[in-house]
Image: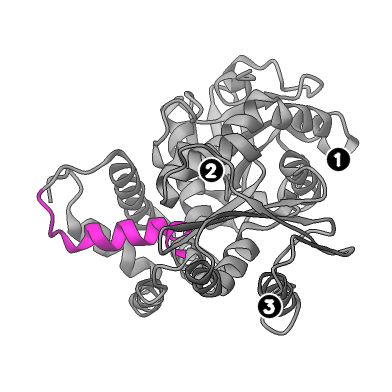
């Protein structure tokens, strides 16, 4: 492996996570298949996939930027573990082991490690108070005569979506074989618009709940060749697909569909016998991802910050794609919600809020990632807001 990171270092990190739990996680990912839900799971666990591949050391190609970043963070984590007290080691390994349990991943841990590295690059001394002292916050950063508490947290964009991507992938995987069969019997180009006035959210869309009913309604509509169907929970409309020169594959068609239906639409394409069937879904109201971040910050402040020092909330916005992350910044949604939060009484201990995503963690999407590694919003009303020593960590980036 052409890398400055030896496979042995990555094997050590995997050992910290627990070899049995690691192997179980990777076995599950290998068995997840090529369905939309399976591909989504592999993306969600991208850190585990990268580390497993690199730890085997079988490739002579240079590492990509995401691979190098993930490998570096993992290697630094091994070094950190070596220098922690016995109690700190126990807490750190417990966090990593927990990350391999159902429904969780390594992103929160890597967000913590990356946040510490980012502050060290700004000449702060960094102490892992969460590990060493079981503090409610994660880090204490010090520079000159100033110090601050840093609480790292992850909030999923799903919390602000009316239609959850996970539920959407599951629905499409369920009906895709039937759509392909229908296309073979009805060659052509079709567009099925789905509007969910009440939303489509996990975990309510299980096999014993809403999902079978959604599948049934779509099946009946197609079998009876109806153009429309609606009730309080779902509005369906089937039309010819009118996009000119649309390519008969998902990769070529998707950019045109995104341009047509906008960033909030959920899109899927099925093909068979030269036919195309597009599904486009929306919620009954606009997404409120930035508002979900604000609500999460308000909820964690009382338990994560002590108020004895200036506090920094380092928020990781999970489950966003490049376009969504860029629009959250360009439309000033995150800035507006963060600054609104900082005016509330519960934020009086918070000197700054920072936000980042997988683009910054993995170092991808040069045009879409934040150049300084994170967005920062300073609380001008906090007594420590103008301390020069804290400026690199709290000064607003926009």
> Mark number for residue 346?
1
Up/down of 100 relative to 67, above or below? below
Residue at the spot 75% in from the left edge and 77% down from the top edge: 213
Quadrant in the rendering for residue 260 = top right
Mark 1 closeness class: few <14, some 14–19, many ≥20 residues within 10 Å = some
> Mark number for residue 321?
2
Residue at the spot 59% in from the left edge and 42% down from the top edge: 242
Residue 238 appears left or right of 52: right
Dot 3 falls on a residue whose secondary structure is loop
Extent of the magenta region:
41-60
Distance, label 1 to label 3, CA atoms, is 37 Å
Mark 2 closeness class: few <14, some 14–19, many ≥20 residues within 10 Å = some
Q: Pointers 1 and 3 in contact (CB under 8 A)?
A: no
Distance, label 2 to label 3, CA atoms, is 25 Å
Distance, label 1 to label 2, CA atoms, is 30 Å
* Front of the two marks 1 and 3: 3
> Mark number for residue 206?
3
Dot 1 falls on a residue whose secondary structure is helix
């Amino acid at each position: 492996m052409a890398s400055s990171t030896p496979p042995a270092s990555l094997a050590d990190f995997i050992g910290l996570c627990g070899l049995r739990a690691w192997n179980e996680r990777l076995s599950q990912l290998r068995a997840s298949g090529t369905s939309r839900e399976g591909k989504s799971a592999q993306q969600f666990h991208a850190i585990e996939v990268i580390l497993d591949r690199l730890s085997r050391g079988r490739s002579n190609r240079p590492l990509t930027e995401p691979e190098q970043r993930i490998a570096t963070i993992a290697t630094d984590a091994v070094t950190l573990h070596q220098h922690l007290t016995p109690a700190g080691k126990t807490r750190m390994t417990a966090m990593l082991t927990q990350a391999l349990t159902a429904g969780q991943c390594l992103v929160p841990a890597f967000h913590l490690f990356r946040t510490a590295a980012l502050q060290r690059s700004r000449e702060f001394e960094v102490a892992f108070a969460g590990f060493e002292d079981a503090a409610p916050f994660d880090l204490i950063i010090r520079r000159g005569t100033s110090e601050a508490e840093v609480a790292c947290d992850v909030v999923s964009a799903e919390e602000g979506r009316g239609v959850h991507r996970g539920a959407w992938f599951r629905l499409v995987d369920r009906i895709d074989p039937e759509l392909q069969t229908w296309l073979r019997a009805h060659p052509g180009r079709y567009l099925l618009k789905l509007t969910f006035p009440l939303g489509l959210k996990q975990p309510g869309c299980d096999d014993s709940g809403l999902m079978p009913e959604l599948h049934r309604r779509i099946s009946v509509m197609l079998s009876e060749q109806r153009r429309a169907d609606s009730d309080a929970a779902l509005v369906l409309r089937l039309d010819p697909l009118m996009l000119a020169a649309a390519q008969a594959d998902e990769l070529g068609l998707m950019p045109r569909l995104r341009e047509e239906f906008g960033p909030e639409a959920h899109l899927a394409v099925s093909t068979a016998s030269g036919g195309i069937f597009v599904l486009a879904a929306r919620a009954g109201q606009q997404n409120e991802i930035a508002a979900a971040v604000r609500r999460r910050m308000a909820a964690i402040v009382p338990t994560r910050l002590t108020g004895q020092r200036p506090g920094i909330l380092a928020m990781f916005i999970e489950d966003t794609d490049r376009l969504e992350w860029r629009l959250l910044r360009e439309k000033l949604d995150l800035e507006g919600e963060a600054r609104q939060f900082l005016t509330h009484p519960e934020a009086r201990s918070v000197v700054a809020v920072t936000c980042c995503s997988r683009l910054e963690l993995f170092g991808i999407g040069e045009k879409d990632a934040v150049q300084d590694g994170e967005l920062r919003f300073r609380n001008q009303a906090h007594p420590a807001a103008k301390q020069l020593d804290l400026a690199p960590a709290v000064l607003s980036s926009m």
